[in-house]
């Protein structure tokens, strides 16, 4: 009895320690970045354009470029992912074909992002240059779309799997067609899972730098649309951290990181708010 | 002579190589409650699900034979299963309301048929809930999520949802097996009222339930119908020895 209590105590200590490490790491990183960056974040910093030698330089073009990239990538990838997941879970019978599709998805998920960058560069920037204007937000978003597809499909498919079959039967038994069942029962029921998938995807899009360096370019002017080349906050951070030598530029790097974290938090909140709205509408 | 709703002739059903229904022949009468009884795996639920073609959704199921509903063979490839299911409603073993409001649950079927008029839907929701003896319980919270109701209420909601389609037949697959005795009693009382307007088939594991709610009873064993007669005869004067053994609880 005594021994068991002691073992229990040790196990509890381990669990506590493990959880504490992950929470502390997050807190330390955020505090570290905010402490070094927050003082440099000002209205001017957020609304000025960037000039490499100007200490009053801002990050507005990168902020806009980031939002463009996130928006366009989600616009391309989410529908494709939803329909792929629906195909795999609702339409396809388990067969050699679905096995191959699943294998391909798992394979895609484990490809390093720089490889996507190289692929996107050869296809979208070079071969499809007449359509994508070479280095552009469009090329970058197409590349990132392919990159985040596997995670999106997997997460959405997992959600679809958790919907009990009784829901589908209930719908069919009421004379609903397959399409009606999918749009009125299955998709609304899996909305929360789809939202989680999108939030995960936003995190990945915002945090990627390598593929974007190769497909969207490093131009620091304000993007004029999806055919403009653009720098995102992350690629800008990469530039500042690797090429910035002055204290001023290092401070800008931390300030950019601060804004980056804020952007992720704000985007997540927006997605959740939108989800709540939709949920209310579909009941 | 009463009207015959389903005339089943030489019905066979296979799950892959396994024959689950063997040459069934049965006439289900309209506006009566027919109970399907028998031990687990005897094919009674499978038979029930042929009547609204729910088995179509299961991979590897093959059927042959005929089920004539009002004279028309519903097993034919030409039959529109969507239309069939609006006429033959179903209530499942586990209450399965959609995770939406009570109102939207009832309006789901009619909306799928293209009814959009709010007035028509309002009336349908009210009349269906009244018919399922649920209106007084929920009339003040129609916009609340149905998942918050008790199990018994959920099952009556599922019955109301089926009624909203104005079906001719309601299939019930062990509708009270997940419910407590009081909720069960309410459902049984409801069945008694509903049979005036609908033809009801109920699969049940409870002999008492079969004898309480049904007019006719079919006893299934290993995919065959052993005996089919009025409930009174089946329970008081079974002709087959197997039937007698089953209803007296010697196996099953």
Image (spheres, helix red, strand yellow):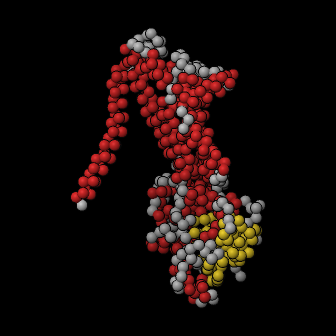
Residue occupying the point 31% across, 43% down: A17
Front one among A229 and A113: A113
- Where, by quadrant of the figure, is residue B81 drawn? bottom right
Give the vertical position of A44 relative to B166 (above or below): above
Give the vertical position of A30 relative to A237 (above or below): below
Any part of residue B82 in sight: yes
Q: Where residue B69 sits in the image (x, y, percent)?
A: 72, 70
Residue occupying the point 52% across, 26% down: A210
Tell me how many marks there are: 0
Furthest residue toward left: A2
- Where, by quadrant of the figure, is residue A4 drawn? bottom left
Q: Where residue B207 sits in the image (x, y, percent)?
A: 53, 80
Q: Where residue B157 sits in the image (x, y, percent)?
A: 53, 62
Any part of residue A66 in sight: no
Q: Where residue A38 sits in the image (x, y, percent)?
A: 36, 23
Front one among B92 and A244: A244
Give the vertical position of A249 relative to A170 (above or below): above
Is B217 placed left or right of B97 in the picture?
A: right
Residue occupying the point 77% across, 61% down: B78
The quadrant of the image that shows the N terminus of chain A is bottom left
Furthest residue toward top: A53
Furthest residue toward front: A3
Front one among A186 and A250: A250
């Amino acid at each position: 009895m005594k021994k068991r209590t002691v073992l229990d105590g040790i196990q509890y200590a381990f669990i506590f320690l493990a959880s504490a490490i992950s929470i502390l790491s997050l807190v330390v990183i955020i505090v570290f970045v905010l402490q070094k960056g927050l003082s440099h974040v000002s209205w001017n910093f957020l609304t000025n354009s960037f000039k490499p030698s100007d200490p009053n330089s801002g990050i507005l073009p990168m902020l806009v470029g980031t939002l463009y990239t996130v928006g366009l990538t989600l616009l391309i990838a989410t529908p494709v992912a939803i329909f792929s997941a629906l195909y795999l879970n609702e339409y396809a019978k388990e067969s050699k074909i679905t096995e191959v599709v699943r294998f391909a998805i798992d394979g895609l998920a484990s490809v390093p992002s720089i490889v996507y960058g190289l692929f996107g560069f050869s296809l979208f920037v070079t071969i499809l240059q007449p359509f994508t204007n070479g280095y552009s937000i469009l090329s970058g978003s197409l590349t990132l779309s392919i990159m985040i597809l596997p995670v999106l499909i997997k997460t959405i498919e997992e959600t679809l799997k958790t919907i009990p079959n009784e829901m589908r039967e209930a719908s069919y038994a009421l004379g609903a067609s397959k399409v009606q069942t999918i749009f009125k029962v299955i998709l609304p029921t899996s909305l929360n899972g789809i939202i989680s998938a999108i939030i995960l995807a936003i995190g990945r899009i915002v945090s990627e730098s390598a593929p974007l360096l190769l497909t969207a370019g490093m131009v620091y002017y304000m993007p004029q649309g999806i055919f403009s080349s653009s720098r995102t906050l992350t690629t800008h951070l990469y530039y500042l951290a690797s090429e910035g030598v002055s204290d001023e530029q290092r401070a800008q790097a931390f300030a950019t990181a601060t804004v980056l974290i804020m952007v992720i938090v704000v985007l997540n909140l927006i997605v959740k708010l939108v989800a709540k709205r939709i949920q209310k509408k579909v009941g | 002579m009463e009207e015959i709703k389903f005339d089943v002739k030489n019905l066979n059903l296979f799950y892959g190589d396994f024959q689950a229904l063997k040459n069934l022949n049965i006439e289900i009468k309209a506006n009566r409650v027919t109970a399907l009884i028998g031990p687990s795996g005897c094919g009674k639920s499978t038979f029930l699900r042929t009547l609204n073609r729910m088995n179509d959704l299961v991979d590897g199921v093959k059927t042959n034979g005929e089920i004539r509903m009002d004279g028309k063979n519903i097993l034919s490839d030409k039959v529109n299963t969507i239309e069939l299911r609006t006429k033959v409603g179903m209530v499942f073993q586990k209450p399965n309301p959609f995770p939406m409001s009570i109102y939207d649950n009832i309006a789901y079927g009619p909306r799928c048929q293209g009814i959009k008029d709010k007035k028509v839907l309002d009336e349908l929701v009210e009349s269906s809930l009244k018919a399922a003896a649920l209106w007084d319980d929920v009339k003040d919270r129609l916009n609340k999520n149905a998942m918050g109701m008790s199990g018994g209420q959920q099952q009556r909601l599922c019955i109301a949802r089926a009624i909203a389609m104005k079906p001719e037949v309601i299939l019930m697959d062990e509708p009270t097996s997940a419910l407590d005795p009081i909720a069960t009693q309410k459902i049984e009382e409801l069945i008694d009222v509903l049979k005036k307007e609908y033809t009801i088939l109920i699969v049940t594991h409870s002999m008492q339930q079969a004898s309480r709610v049904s007019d006719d009873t079919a006893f299934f064993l290993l995919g065959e119908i052993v005996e089919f007669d009025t409930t009174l005869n089946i329970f008081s004067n079974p002709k087959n020895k197997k039937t007698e053994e089953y209803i007296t609880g010697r196996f099953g």
